[in-house]
Amino acid sequence: MSEILTRVTEVIANKLGHDPEVLRPDTNLTTSLGDDGMLAVELALAFAKEFAIDITDIDVASLQPLADAEQMIRDRVQRHERVG
């Protein structure tokens, strides 16, 4: 598991109250989040803090599998490092 995937998994597990071990790259975040807009906001804030990136609750709500979250965050971290 990549460092970013590990950190993404830990953030999500913390916010959802799950054991990180039960979250896999194919875990459907839409199902986990349901219609909880506040949880999407909390995850966006947690990702922004953890990775020093700009991300919105709308971005988070659009993610389906956990692997999508990893890829989006990886792309934004790389973009941030280039702009830096």
Image (cartoon, rainbow, N blue to C red):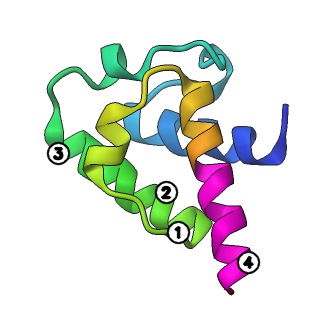
Q: Secondary structure at mark 4?
A: helix
Q: Earlier in the sequence, mark 3 or mark 4?
A: 3
Taking the spot 85% from the left edge, 31% from the top edge, the residue there is 1
* Residue 8: x %, y % from top left: 61, 43
Q: Which segment did they paint magenta? A: 73-83
Q: Earlier in the sequence, mark 1 or mark 2?
A: 2
Q: Nearer the viewer, residue 83 or 49?
A: 83
Q: Nearer the viewer, residue 43 or 18?
A: 43
Q: Amino acid at mark 3?
A: Met
Q: From the image, state whether disc 1 or disc 2 is nearer to you.
A: 1
Distance (Cα) linking label 3 and label 1: 19 Å
Q: Amino acid at mark 4?
A: Arg
Q: From the image, state whether disc 3 or disc 1 is nearer to you.
A: 1
Q: Amino acid at mark 1?
A: Ile
Q: Secondary structure at mark 3?
A: helix
Q: Secondary structure at mark 2?
A: helix
Which residue has dot 2 on it? 47
Horizontally, residue 31 falls left or right of residue 22, namely left
23 within the magenta span:
no
Q: Amino acid at mark 2?
A: Phe
CB under 8 Å between discs 1 and 2:
yes
Q: Neighbour class for label 1 at 10 Å: few (<14), some, many (≥20)?
A: many
Q: From the image, state whether disc 3 or disc 4 is nearer to you.
A: 4
Q: Is residue 28 above or below residue 82?
A: above
Q: Earlier in the sequence, mark 1 or mark 4?
A: 1
Picture disc at residue 82? 4
